[in-house]
Amino acid sequence: MASKPTDVRPLNTPGPFEWPVADDEVREALDAAYRDGSWGQYHGPHSEGLIGDLQQHFSVEHVSLCSSGTIGIELALRGCGVEASDEVILAGYDFPGNFRAIEALGARPVLVDVHPSTWCLDAEQLANLRGEKIKAVIVSHLHGGLADMPKIVAIARERGWQVIEDACQQPGAQLAGRPVGSWGDVSVLSFGGSKLLTAGRGGAVFTDQAQCHQRMKVYADRGNQAFPLSELQATVLRPQLKKLAQRNQLRSQRAGEICQAVSHLSKWLRPVSCQADAQPVFYKFAWSFTPAETMPELREELLAKLAAANMPIGAGFRGFVNRSERRCKKVGSLKHSSQLSQSTILLHHPVLLAQKNAALQVAQSLDYLVRQMVT
Ligand SMILES: Cc1ncc(COP(=O)(O)O)c(C=O)c1O
């Protein structure tokens, strides 16, 4: 049992934690785009340069830039040749747009459970799954957890399914010595305003398969590119990509320090964790507030306290367990997806680039508020 919360009253949470952070190279890129007029162009050297950078960084053959991660997932499904009446496997806990992307093609999501440690699709759940109509599986790396791609890719190969790897939350992560985003038959990044590589909006789709790349290109061509990323967006992404590894390293260190600082509450705050050969990156850092796995109102109470203290911690995804059976198929009980939809709290990444003291003050406040509720 944790001690009564009488010792610390740290609710002077530091912040605001800014994002995007000030970056001279980004400002210089914007100035240069203003001077040379590329800010007003559809396509040009900045987009081509970004494509080259991404090909190299992620060791992939083809890169398509696009308008968002959400559209990227839809393009990926189209690139894989998914059609109306096909089925696509999706985790029961995932980004809501991924469910909608499957529906946008007229296809049907088949929901499987997530692993409770990683928050990601559980490879074991795929092992016994078969179905004539299944064409692809979408696998997202979420909240500092990484999906077991070697196992998932092996099962998918055996069944003839295409793997769509959603790396929107984890640019720069590594798994078994390979970049996350290079495991899928087709993989997707987001450059949305809150993301680790940001252009306000935007995305990219990677594949080594020429046919997949060509299908996406044909679909997006409406006389010009219908889901574009502009020159201006491309130019601010290039300097950020150069700094990604260094920033990811700092974020990982801070995530470890914060996690450690509240580890004495592990009975109530269960942190995301990964395989031994994984190096996740942190866009969000997840804990399950375990009392809420059975009593969801407790998480709402904790979230209200966190918001009142200006803590940069919010709720996880709502998940798909309660979606109608008319819209999707459900495999098994989806127990973990259900629990995590109720209990997940997420620390936002700008805290992880702050000074250690500021980050630890956030941990202290979290500690204080959780103990107020559980003791
Ligand atoms: C896992 C995941 N996939 C896809 C997306 C969609 O990206 P975008 O906001 O660029 O549409 C997000 C956005 O948060 C995400 O977290």
Image (cartoon, rainbow, N blue to C red):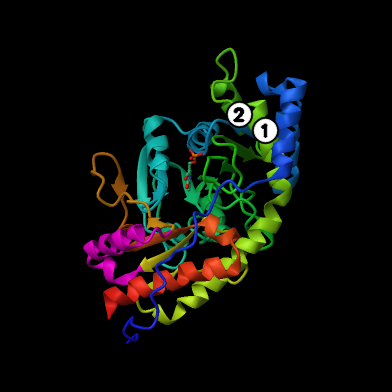
Label 2 crowding class (10 Å Cα cut-off): few <14, some 14-19, many 20+?
many
User: In the visual, does 22 lie left or right of 349?
Assistant: right
Which residue is at the front of the view, 210 or 352? 352
Q: Are marks 2 and 1 in contact (CB under 8 Å)?
A: yes
For the C terminus, give its image quadrant. Answer: bottom left
Q: Residue at position x 67%, y 33% from top? A: 234
Question: Magenta part of the protein: which range?
Answer: 289-311
Q: Residue at position x 57%, y 40% from top? A: 191
Which residue is at the front of the view, 36 or 295? 36
- From this view, report whether residue 368 is shown above or below residue 210: below
- From this view, report whether residue 75 is shown above or below residue 110: above
Q: Residue at position x 76%, y 27% from top? A: 45
| Main secondary structure found in the magenta portion | helix
User: In the visual, does 39 lie left or right of 262?
Assistant: right
Sequence-wise, the earlier of marks 2 and 1 is 2
Let me know if residue 184 appears in the view.
Answer: yes
Q: Which residue is mark 1?
A: 234
- Residue 252 at what x, y percent from top left? 60, 65
**Which amino acid, mark 1?**
Ala
User: In the visual, does 163 lie left or right of 49?
Assistant: left
- Quadrant housing residue 367: bottom left
- Residue 373 at what x, y percent from top left? 27, 73
**Which amino acid, mark 2?**
Leu
User: In the visual, does 188 lie left or right of 120?
Assistant: right
Label 1 crowding class (10 Å Cα cut-off): few <14, some 14-19, many 20+?
many
Let me know if residue 339 appears in the view.
Answer: no
Which residue is at the front of the view, 165 or 163? 165
Q: Which residue is mark 2?
A: 229
